[in-house]
Amino acid sequence: MTSRLVLVSPAIGPALREARFYDGSSSIDEAGAARARAAAGTLPDAARVVLSPGARCRETAEALRLRGGVAAELGPLDAGRWRGRTLAEVGSAEGEAVARWLADPDCAAPGGESVREVCARVGRWLESVPEGRTVAVVEPEVVRAAVVHALGLPAGAFWRLDVAPLTATELSGRAGRWNLRLGRPLGGE
């Protein structure tokens, strides 16, 4: 039997609009919640629902009328001491460090985790996905990491994958071989 995984990115909120390093507490805004409520019922039925631990994933799932458990291994990329700050703020203060972090998948934000580490963490989880359909409401970087792992892409491809808010990215496969259906808007065909 095939494993089917639908990765849903969270609805829009201030942190996404501001390109702010996620700190786990940022919420979706009313416009994002309204879009998610309008998309409720458009996802296929699933045997299980899992969530990234952050507030915006929980709020998006609630607006979509999904109930599931939190999976710590699906947490966002840990930005260390940059958490809560905008990319522009950090770039102004630590331009060279940000440039290294964006260019080298082995470079972690100070006190944080590297792209390669998040790809490995999410990849381990991905390989444990059981048969049947799973819906996961997860941070955009978790979607990127899952795609990098599933397709065997180099970790450097991570930042080249754009994940729009409130889209579904679908992976299906068995025995470690995954196929990809890219980011359809929820509520669309």
Image: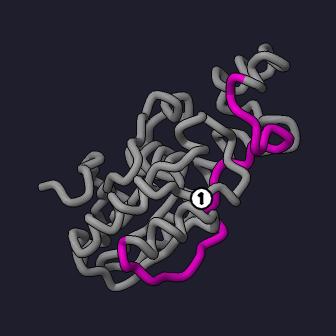
Viewer-proximal residue among 134 and 70: 70
Q: Give the residue drawn at x 43%, y 42%.
A: 152
Q: Main secondary structure of the magenta part?
A: loop
- Look at the image and give the residue range highlighted in magenta: 64-88
> Is 179 placed above or below 163 here?
below
**Which element type, helix, strand or loop, lies under badge 1?**
loop
Residue 167 at x, y = what percent?
33, 52
Q: Quadrant of the C terminus?
A: bottom left
* 168 sits left or right of 18 in the view: left
**Residue type of the residue flagged with mark 1:** Ser
* 185 sits left or right of 75 in the view: left
* 112 sits left or right of 73 in the view: right
Residue 55 at x, y = what percent?
61, 65
Residue 186 at x, y = what percent?
26, 58
> Is 112 placed above or below 134 here?
above
Graded by Cα atoms within 10 Å as few (under 14), some (14 to 19) or many (20 or more), the crowding at tag 1 reads many
Q: Quadrant of residue 176?
A: bottom left
Residue 24 at x, y = what percent?
69, 58
* Residue denoted by label 1: 27
Q: Give the residue drawn at x 45%, y 75%.
A: 62
Residue 141 located within the stretch drawn in magenta: no
Q: Give the residue drawn at x 59%, y 35%.
A: 18
